[in-house]
Structure formats: C-alpha cells, structure tokens
Amino acid sequence: MATILLLSGPNLNLLGTREPHIYGSDTLDDCVGDARAAAEAHGHALEHVQSNHEGDLVEAIQGARDRCAAIVINPGAYTHSSYAIADALAAYSGVKVELHLSNPASREEWRRTSVVAAYVTGTVAGFGRAGYRLAVEAAAARLGDA
Ligand code: DQA
C-alpha cells in the first residue's frame, strides 16, 4: 500500500461556489472524496492538503519525499507562475500528476503556460470533477497496480 498526496492550490477551497460555469458546482470535499475512493480501490491511502499559500505547497511537496509514492497536484493559478513549486516537484522523484478541472489550454492566454508541466509525469485537464478519479487512476497505473 502506498500513500498518494493530493495537493490543492489557491481558491480551490471555494469550489462549489467559485465560477460554477467553469469549475462546476461540486465542492472540494466532493472531489477529494472521489480521489480517496479511487486510491482505496487500488489499495492506496490518500492524503489531502489545500492551501492558498505557495510556501505551504512547497513544504507539502518536500514532506512527501521518501514518504509518498505519488503526488496529484492542482496548483490553481500557481500553475502559471510558481517556479518554487516547479523546483519542489523537480526535486521529488515519485509519480507526479498535474490536474486541472478546466482545460487551461483552451482559456485565456496567461493560463496556457504551465511552469510545472515540465516536471510532472503527465497531466489530466478539462474533465471537471471526474479528473480527480482519473488522476489517481493514472498515478496508480504508474505505480504498477492498475
Ligand atoms: C485550475 C486552472 C487555473 O488556471 C486556475 O487558476 C485555477 C484552477 C483548474 O483546475 O482548472 O485556480 O487549476
């Protein structure tokens, strides 16, 4: 059994009421519940951390080294700006899945660059709440048990 760390960046705590036409009306708890169910279906545990602060996310990634087999991260807007999170991911050698509810590549110009994309195993984007299950299944597949 492995531990998968799910990280949620800024403003994701507002899911359910935040621009529901883009992000849907399900809450972060709903999404985390789906991710946890998917992890447990593969015999893994899931930990979740949400923070609106860049340093908290960096520390959570550092804390996953040698402890968690995979990280699924929706960095929110830090996707497009945080070299600190990119560096932390580069220093983490486990499986890494970048996750987005929306498809940033089809939105505003500034969302079309991900500074973390070069440091992840792969990306799940554009599938809304279902992406949480898909991202965990992708991580589990890479861990060799799906
Ligand atoms: C997001 C996309 C980002 O551009 C945005 O800043 C978010 C959410 C998504 O899940 O679609 O906060 O990561």
Image (spheres, helix red, strand yellow):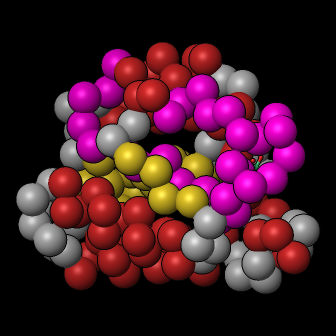
Residue 2, x across and y down, in percent: 18, 56
Q: Nearer the viewer, residue 12 or 97?
A: 97
Q: Which residues are magenta?
A: 91-117
Instruction: Please say if 103 is above or below 82.
Output: below
Magenta stretch: residue 115 in it?
Answer: yes
Tell me which residue sits at (33%, 77%) in the image: 38
Q: Tell whether 109 sits left or right of 102.
A: right
Q: Tell whether 117 sits left or right of 36.
A: right
Q: Tell whether 39 sits left or right of 35.
A: left
Magenta stretch: residue 114 in it?
Answer: yes
Residue 75, x across and y down, in percent: 62, 43
Rendered image quadrant of residue 81: top right
Q: Is residue 46 visible?
A: yes
Tell me which residue sits at (87%, 76%) in the image: 21
Instruction: Please say if 107 is above or below 119.
Output: below
Q: Nearer the viewer, residue 45 or 10?
A: 10
Tell me which residue sits at (20%, 31%) in the image: 66
Q: Tell whether 14 sits left or right of 1.
A: right
Tell me which residue sits at (62%, 66%) in the image: 126
Instruction: Please say if 136 is above or below 56.
Output: below
Residue 93, x across and y down, in percent: 25, 29
Residue 110, x across and y down, in percent: 82, 35
Rendered image quadrant of residue 94: top left
